[in-house]
Amino acid sequence: MKGIFINEAFTEAINNYLSSKDNQNGIAYNSFLVVCLRLLMVIYSESDIVNPYQIKNTELLIDNLRKYGYPEAKINEFFSNFQEYNAIAKKNQNLAIKEKNPYFITIQKQIIDMFITKKVNFHVLEEEIRAFYELLYSPDCKEPLMISDNYLMAGNNINEIKEYFEHEMATHIKVVEEAEKNYLNNRSYEIMGYSMDQIKALSEEELEKMNHQVYDYFKIRENAINKEYLLEKAIEEFEHQRRPLTSGNGYVDILLIMGIVSTVVMVGAILTFIVF
């Protein structure tokens, strides 16, 4: 395959996603590897997955998948399993008796592990949990093709992925004190048009979502160790760019303007004298 990115399976999957996203009821959009990409996009974002592909930057993709703490070694293992799944799936197209494809379960469990890593180290909203679960292969799927694939490929236990997800969600709980709220620099909220009274009225979940927006606005990666320092510097830069030419004192400002005008007039007079 020409222009391979990561491996043949990942390249094929992302091409199929891009070509089928406008036909969300189609076979390609609901095929296994494309669904896996869509699961990743729930955890991260579409741009985290698609942008590295478009600029052919594999390091950026790996860095994006690491941003919530998922280990790079496991990311590489995930890509390898992606390729292995596709190899068996292609071979089965020409077989009357299909070979069992264990990577159907393995890959989904790895993606669930990525989701749990985000849940424990950062935060996930209820709508993210719901959107993620609806894309997992289980009898609860809303898409008929996915239900059919689950019955054909899940083996003896069609609830295996459902049970794994529920177990991991119940086992890995981020313990946060009820009174704990993570406020960023007050000025960062004001720059985005919010008063501190509005910010303090937010629930913990709403505040965390707002903080995500702040870091996105100032183009700061949330996995950066010094992200608070970077935010302070970004605010300083913002203030510097919008700072007007004024001393804050009206009388001094008048003298400053008069000095500038006098200088311009004097320079003009000198040039006139030289020329004539």
Image (cartoon, rainbow, N blue to C red):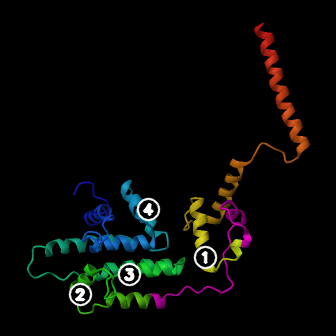
Q: Which residue is mark 1?
A: 206
Q: Secondary structure at mark 2?
A: helix
Q: Which residues are magenta?
A: 169-197
Residue 134's tag is: 3
Residue drawn at point x = 31 percent, y = 88 percent: 139
- State the quadrant of the N terminus: bottom left
Q: Which residue is mark 2?
A: 151
Tell me if 208 is positioned left or right of 265 in this view: left
Q: Which residue type carries mark 1?
A: Glu
Q: CA distance from mark 3 to mark 1?
A: 23 Å
Q: Along the line of sight, which residue is nearer the eye, 111 or 26?
A: 26
Task: Tell me: residue 165, above or below residue 237.
Answer: below
Q: Which residue type carries mark 4?
A: Ser
Residue 183 lies in the magenta stretch: yes
Q: Secondary structure at mark 1?
A: helix
What secondary structure prevails in the magenta region?
A: loop
Earlier residue among tags 4 and 2 = 4
Q: Secondary structure at mark 3?
A: helix
Q: Which residue type carries mark 3?
A: Glu
Asked if disc 4 and disc 3 are in contact, CB closer than 8 Å, the reply is: no
Q: Crowding at label 1, few (<14), some or many (≥20) Cα neighbours within 10 Å?
A: few
Task: Tell me: residue 4, above or below residue 43.
Answer: above
Q: Crowding at label 2, few (<14), some or many (≥20) Cα neighbours within 10 Å?
A: some
x and y percentages locating residue 6 in the rendered image: 32, 62
